[in-house]
């Protein structure tokens, strides 16, 4: 059986994000690792999944936002009469750019996108010490409306589509954070989310609406959901069903379910509110980035993605709460858009990598966008994830995905334990060439959905509250012990790895157990007090939830920090960090490297000058994997 090489793991297939449906066009972002992570916007006609799309933002444009550290919501597009209007944020300066195309209906070649450039790219904002993103095009007022992050605060701002190099026009100032805007169909009301600094948006947030005047003044705004007493309620993605009805997800029942509010639009008074459909499933996900979508409207129906135990489904829901599941062979779904009986999503499963899927909601059929096939393994040579449950911390049932080796001459195999980042995130069983790299070499892989993971309800998520760096580590250690007891793995050949928050969990595992024989971390959190004092604004209050408030819990911060438990770490460790990382500074890796080096524990550190938090350059990713593989094999005593 062939082994997957590092170059195949990080092939030429770009990462797809934020698809949009505009009339008969499908648009999406492509983040291209082979262009050093540059992101560009492409367009094609609906149904022409095998044609060559048109690139609307060729190099050197790089569509990316930096709002709240992780970005998202980097472009907005609308049709106005016979024009397609595009506004985007370019990463080189952070400025807003606008371009428009005229719609041509006399093209002879049907496969060609019927657009002709109407106006060249134009910069409509000045460059400044602010960040822009998460915006929309307000056709009624011919303006871009979105988020500006500036001097530790968030603002709603507008820019005219007809002027160059404008100062931001501030129409609203939040107390702390805001985002996820949606305009009512008549363009008169704006809905958005807000959350305070001490909370993350998936812990406690508020739904606001306001009246937008003809002259772009935001007036008569107020909270309409999410401020119930002292209970922490999280709200996700407000979307207008009509001028009077607003949909959103909230977790008041313990699961992010869809709710609606009927409004008296004359005075923003709530007429009625209800839970549209009550089910043990999540119709939302943690808002690490802007631009995510799990709810869409198609004619008079609601189209929604739901997740249960880290597997997603596509649903059509009526206003009476009737639900119908659309049968598609994919269970990792994201970025839903729908309109006029059509829907698009980014979808994958255990044997197909993520691609764009078109869905006819009337016929209930789907069509996949053609992608370059990087798969050098046959389908029967892939390792398919098996769902396992085990007793983790406090004897709580905990979930993991287990991948058996694709080929092995031994009953007991090396094991790689993967710790997802976040920690408020989850592992799915979507085809991941990185995992197949190891299973094609005779390794088992365990991908743990430890306490705090999403997709399992609020109670599961809140199991990590106050326990980060301990509860999650206990879960991962318990998962490995379960596999050892089943006789699946060689207990002398166990590796563990994690990135960012997953790096802290990885290092915590090394301080709490000798079961791991080698470890790897990318940009790990190693000093919690330092992170509390120096991390970026978006996560400045995250540790209050994960560990507790300071100074009351200062001892917990100290003793949960791997840098203060160096005496307990004797496991060979390899570290990778981006010099431009402003979420977890490179000093966190340097300090633990120096401390272990002084102890004579085998340790290596590799830094990358042009990388930040999350590596985007294909060549960097390939180098990291090769270095990691060599390090693992050398310290486990396995021959290449």
Image (tube, rainbow, N blue to C red):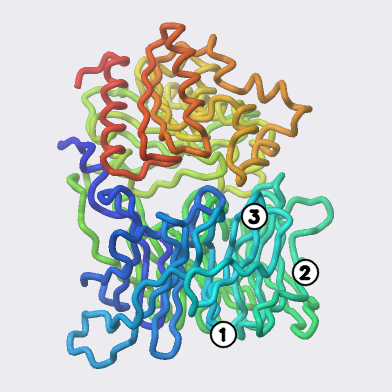
Residue 304 image point, x, y percent: 52, 67
**Location of residue 549 with respect to 362 vertically, above or below:** above
Residue 474 image point, x, y percent: 57, 26
**Residue wearing tag 1:** 140
Q: Choose between 425 and 130: the one closer to the eye.
A: 130
For this orientation, the residue located farthest to the left is 1
Q: Residue at x 65, y 57 (%)?
A: 154
To which quarter of the image does residue 549 belong? top right
> Could you say whether the residue bearing mark 1 is in a helix, strand or loop?
loop
Residue 580 is tagged as none
**Location of residue 56 with respect to 471 vertically, above or below:** below
Disc 1 crowd rating (10 Å Cα; few below 14, some 14-19, many 20+) is few
* Front disc: 3 or 2: 2
For this orientation, the residue located farthest to the right is 229
- Quadrant of the rendering where the C terminus is positioned: top left
* Front disc: 1 or 2: 1
Q: CA distance from mark 1 to mark 2?
A: 23 Å
Disc 2 crowd rating (10 Å Cα; few below 14, some 14-19, many 20+) is some
**Location of residue 111 with respect to 368 vertically, above or below:** below
Image side of residue 180 versus residue 31, left or right: right
**Residue wearing tag 2:** 222
Name the N-terminal-most of marks 3 and 2: 2
Q: CA distance from mark 3 to mark 2?
A: 25 Å
Q: Residue at x 36, y 35 (%)?
A: 609
Q: Is residue 253 visible?
A: no
Residue 233 image point, x, y percent: 72, 54
Q: CA distance from mark 3 to mark 1?
A: 36 Å
Image side of residue 613 versus residue 437, left or right: right
**Residue wearing tag 3:** 255
- Quadrant of the rendering where the N terminus is positioned: top left
> Could you say whether the residue bearing mark 2 is in a helix, strand or loop?
strand
């Amino acid at each position: 059986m062939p082994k997957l090489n590092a170059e195949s793991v990080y092939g030429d297939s770009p990462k797809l994000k934020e698809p949009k449906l505009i009339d008969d066009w499908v648009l999406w972002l492509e983040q291209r690792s082979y262009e050093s992570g540059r992101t560009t916007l492409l367009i094609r006609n609906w149904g022409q999944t095998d044609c060559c799309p048109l690139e609307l933002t060729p190099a050197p444009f790089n569509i990316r936002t930096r709002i709240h550290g992780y970005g998202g919501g980097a472009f907005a597009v609308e049709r106005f009469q016979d024009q397609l209007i595009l506004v985007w944020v370019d990463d080189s300066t952070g400025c807003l750019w606008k371009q428009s195309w005229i719609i041509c209906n006399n093209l002879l070649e049907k496969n060609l996108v019927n657009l002709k450039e109407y106006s060249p790219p134009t910069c409509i904002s000045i460059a400044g010490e602010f960040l822009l993103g998460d915006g929309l095009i307000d056709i009624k007022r011919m303006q871009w409306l979105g988020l500006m992050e500036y001097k530790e605060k968030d603002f709603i701002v507008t820019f005219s589509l007809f002027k160059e190099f404008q100062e931001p026009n501030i129409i609203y100032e939040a107390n702390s954070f805001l985002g996820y805007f949606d305009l009512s169909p008549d363009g008169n009301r704006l809905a958005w989310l807000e959350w305070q600094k001490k909370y993350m948006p998936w812990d406690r947030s508020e739904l606001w609406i306001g009246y937008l005047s003809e002259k772009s003044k935001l007036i008569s705004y107020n909270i309409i959901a999410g401020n119930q007493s002292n209970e922490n309620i999280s709200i996700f993605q407000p979307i207008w069903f009509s001028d009077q009805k607003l949909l959103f997800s909230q977790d008041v029942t313990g699961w992010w379910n869809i709710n609606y509010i009927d409004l008296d639009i004359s005075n923003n008074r709530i007429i009625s509110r209800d839970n549209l459909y009550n089910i043990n499933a999540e119709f939302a996900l943690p808002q690490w980035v802007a631009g995510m979508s799990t709810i869409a409207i198609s004619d008079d129906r609601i189209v929604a993605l739901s997740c249960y135990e880290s597997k997603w489904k596509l649903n059509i829901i009526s206003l009476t709460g009737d639900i119908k599941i659309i049968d598609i062979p994919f269970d990792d779904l994201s970025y839903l858009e729908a309109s006029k009986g059509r829907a698009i999503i980014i979808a994958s499963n255990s044997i197909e990598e993520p691609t764009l899927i078109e869905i006819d909601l009337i016929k209930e059929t789907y069509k996949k966008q053609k992608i370059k096939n990087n798969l050098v393994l046959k389908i029967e040579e892939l390792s398919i994830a098996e769902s396992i449950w085990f007793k983790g911390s406090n004897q709580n049932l905990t979930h993991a995905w287990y991948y058996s080796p694709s080929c092995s001459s031994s009953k007991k195999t090396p094991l790689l334990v993967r710790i997802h980042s976040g920690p408020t995130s989850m592992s799915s069983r979507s085809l991941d060439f990185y995992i197949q790299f190891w299973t094609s070499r005779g390794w088992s892989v365990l991908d743990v959905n430890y306490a705090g993971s999403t997709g399992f309800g609020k109670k599961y998520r809140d199991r990590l509250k106050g326990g980060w760096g301990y509860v999650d580590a206990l879960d991962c250690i318990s998962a490995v012990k379960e596999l050892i007891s089943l006789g699946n793995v060689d207990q002398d050949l166990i590796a563990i790895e994690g990135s960012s928050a997953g790096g802290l969990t990885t290092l915590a595992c090394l301080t709490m157990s000798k079961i791991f024989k080698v470890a790897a971390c990318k940009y790990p959190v190693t000093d919690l007090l330092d992170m509390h004092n120096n991390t970026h604004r978006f996560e400045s209050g995250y540790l209050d939830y994960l560990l507790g408030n300071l100074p009351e819990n200062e001892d917990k911060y100290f003793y949960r920090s791997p840098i203060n438990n160096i005496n307990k770490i004797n496991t060979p460790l390899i570290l990778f960090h981006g010099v431009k990382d402003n979420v977890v500074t490179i000093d966190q890796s340097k300090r633990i490297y120096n401390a272990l080096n002084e102890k004579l524990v085998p340790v290596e550190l590799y830094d990358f000058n042009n990388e930040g938090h999350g590596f985007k350059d294909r060549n960097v990713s390939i180098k990291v994997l090769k270095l990691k593989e060599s390090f693992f094999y050398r310290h486990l005593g396995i021959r290449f």
